[in-house]
Image (tube, rainbow, N blue to C red):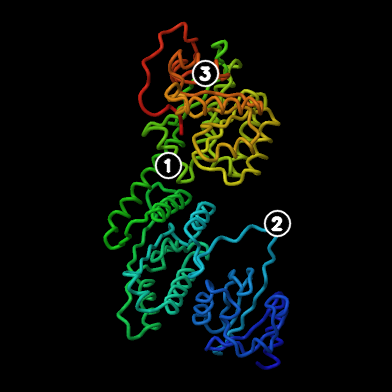
């Protein structure tokens, strides 16, 4: 490297921590900058060494591919890579003219309490793992992938077990690194490519990326690694998210749901055999998303109201607002809305409708369900606070019932949000207590006023001494921490009497009233109780 070039590069990359020049063989010919601080070494020790030695294994394939493909007088777009010594860094670069050498810069990314954690990546390929990939899709609804709707390409290396045996461990790792690099380079963003299983991969991209071409490049990589071995085959399938009436945001949701379905499928995954099945899955998902969206926008979601009663007096305490949909049972519809990322829209609309009812009748108190997914969304929390802030006087009569059909991943944050709700007048109920393993950590961490015992315990009341003891213990625990207890699915007078004797204060169920289109309660003594219900409980979840 000449002095003039070195000066030019020093000026061009002044903001970087480290500058290295790499030749066509991937060997370092020059190094300068904060080498000891960032890399723990010196320029003399680096010269003549492969660039691979500075980069963590999962990102080596990416760096090799970038070095091979950068054009004359072209810059490398900054990318986050992991350093071999630990910690992330921003990699950028430039090729001067037709030189075989590439100048690379590394800038260490300082991490701490205020920085967002980096997404989890697969160690062999550098691709995001399925969970991290799904989380990225969830954060990036309304994906910007250039012209047109986003596309999802799925790739499977055929007979991967034989491929590994043929290549051996070292070359298999090289192949996986090449696959990961290829997908990361062609994805719309570095966080929109994933490894879904040992031999399965996926990426979100724009229209110019070609699935068969990607598969061909993987086959070429196999030939380069083992020229005498049989040809490597990569099956591929590209799904276009363009659909009439489907917004870019909802297209992202369909992508997430499709990827989640594949990530959870542990059976054999033969793309060639599953093309029709995959497209059918996407078509059905698009249809369900479109239907749910039109239900919300066309105001076809309705509420029903079921009374919650004070056991001691049989007087009305409040109502639970239950979502009802024109095209499907509420439970599966809400579960789908949670999976697809639309439950926040459902919860907000239910709150809006409940507030309208409260405003029309000052004698009412209404509980609305709030999914853990909604509670975990900052956008939803702000929207909810703005909605109830239009009529602050209704806050004390709008109860929030937190459901755990999807788990709360950040309990300290959820506790702060719920405490903010309580400070302005809302009371908080924890739904389905005892139904999941997280129930006790939730009641320990969250500020709640009511706990609703899961109805399966009430249905088994009197069935065994063991079940009855557990039920009594739960109500005793709640009394100790001064939380009121609601029993759900109460269907007979005998159940109501026994629950009262054990200290339950509130109850809900067919014995006190079925869900109805309008709030209206009559004490049980004034009507003939209906026959005992069969099947699942009436609830939005």
Circle 2 packing at 10 Å, graded few (<14), some (14-19), many (20+), is few
Towards the viewer: 157 or 95 = 157
Separation (CA) of disc 1 from disc 2: 34 Å
Q: Secondary structure at mark 2?
A: loop
Estimate the x, y position of residue 23 in percent, counting from the top left.
56, 88
226 to 257, vertically: above or below = below
Look at 32% across and 86% down and name the residue there.
228
Quick check: marks 1 and 3 in contact, CB under 8 Å?
A: no
Separation (CA) of disc 1 from disc 3: 34 Å
Residue under numbered circle 3: 499
Say whether residue 70 is left or right of residue 416. Answer: left
Quick check: marks 1 and 2 in contact, CB under 8 Å?
A: no
- Of the two numbered discs 1 and 2 on the same chain, state the one appearing first in sequence: 2
Q: Which mark is residue 113?
A: 2
Look at 60% across and 15% down and name the residue there.
363
Q: Quadrant of the N terminus?
A: bottom right
Look at 64% across and 35% down and name the residue there.
385
Separation (CA) of disc 2 from disc 3: 48 Å
Q: Secondary structure at mark 3?
A: helix
Q: Secondary structure at mark 1?
A: helix
Say whether residue 339 is left or right of residue 484. Answer: left
Circle 1 packing at 10 Å, graded few (<14), some (14-19), many (20+), is some
Estimate the x, y position of residue 90 in percent, counting from the top left.
63, 71
- Of the two numbered discs 2 and 3 on the same chain, state the one appearing first in sequence: 2
480 to 114, vertically: above or below = above
Residue under numbered circle 1: 336
- Of the two numbered discs 1 and 3 on the same chain, state the one appearing first in sequence: 1
Say whether residue 417 is left or right of residue 159. Answer: right
Estimate the x, y position of residue 207 in percent, counting from the top left.
41, 64
307 to 536, vertically: above or below = above
- Figure quadrant of residue 84: bottom right
């Amino acid at each position: 490297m000449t002095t003039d070039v070195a000066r030019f590069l020093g000026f061009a990359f002044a903001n970087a921590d480290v500058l290295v020049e790499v030749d066509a063989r991937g060997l370092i010919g020059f190094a300068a900058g904060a080498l000891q601080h960032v890399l723990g070494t010196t320029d003399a020790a680096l010269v003549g060494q492969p660039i691979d030695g500075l980069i963590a294994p999962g990102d080596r394939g990416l760096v090799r591919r970038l070095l091979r493909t950068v054009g004359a007088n072209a810059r490398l777009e900054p990318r986050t890579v992991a350093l071999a010594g630990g910690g992330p860094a921003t990699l950028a670069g430039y090729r001067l003219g037709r030189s075989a050498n590439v100048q690379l810069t590394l800038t260490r990314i300082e991490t701490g309490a205020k920085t967002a954690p980096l997404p989890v990546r697969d160690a062999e390929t550098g691709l995001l793992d399925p969970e991290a990939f799904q989380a990225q899709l969830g954060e990036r609804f309304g994906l910007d992938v250039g012209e047109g709707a986003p596309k999802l390409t799925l790739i499977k290396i055929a007979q991967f077990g034989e491929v590994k045996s043929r290549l051996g461990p070292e070359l298999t790792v090289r192949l996986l690194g090449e696959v990961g690099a290829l997908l990361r380079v062609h994805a719309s963003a570095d966080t929109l490519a994933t490894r879904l299983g040992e031999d399965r991969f996926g990426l979100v991209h724009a229209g110019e990326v070609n699935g068969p071409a990607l598969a061909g490049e993987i086959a070429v990589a196999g030939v380069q690694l083992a020229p005498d071995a049989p040809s490597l085959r990569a099956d591929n399938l590209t799904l276009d998210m363009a659909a009439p009436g489907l917004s870019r945001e909802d297209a992202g949701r369909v992508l997430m749901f499709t990827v989640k379905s594949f990530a959870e499928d542990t059976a054999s995954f033969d793309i060639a055999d599953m093309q029709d099945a995959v497209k059918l899955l996407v078509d059905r998902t698009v249809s369900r998303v479109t239907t749910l969206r039109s239900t919300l926008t066309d105001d076809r979601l309705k509420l029903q109201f079921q009374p919650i009663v004070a056991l001691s007096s049989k007087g009305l305490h409040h109502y639970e607002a239950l979502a009802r949909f024109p095209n499907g049972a509420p439970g599966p519809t809400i579960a789908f809305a949670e999976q697809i990322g639309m439950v926040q829209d459902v919860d907000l609309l239910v709150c809006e409708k409940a507030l309208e009812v409260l405003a029309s009748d000052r004698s009412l108190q209404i509980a609305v369900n709030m999914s853990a997914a909604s509670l975990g969304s900052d956008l939803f929390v702000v929207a909810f606070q703005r909605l109830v802030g239009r009529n602050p006087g209704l806050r004390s009569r709008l109860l929030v019932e937190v459901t755990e059909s999807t788990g709360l991943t950040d309990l300290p944050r959820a506790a702060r949000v719920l405490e903010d709700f309580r400070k302005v007048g809302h009371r908080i109920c924890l739904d389905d207590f005892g139904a999941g393993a997280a129930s006790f950590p939730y009641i320990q961490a969250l500020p709640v006023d009511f706990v609703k015992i899961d109805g399966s315990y009430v249905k088994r009341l009197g069935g065994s001494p063991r079940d009855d003891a557990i039920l009594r213990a739960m109500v005793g625990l709640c009394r100790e921490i001064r939380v009121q207890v609601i029993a759900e699915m109460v269907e007979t007078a005998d159940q109501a009497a026994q629950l009262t004797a054990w200290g339950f204060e509130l109850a809900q169920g067919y014995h006190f009233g079925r869900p109805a289109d309008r709030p209206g309660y009559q004490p049980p003594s004034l009507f003939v109780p209906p026959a005992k219900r069969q099947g699942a409980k009436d609830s939005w979840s």
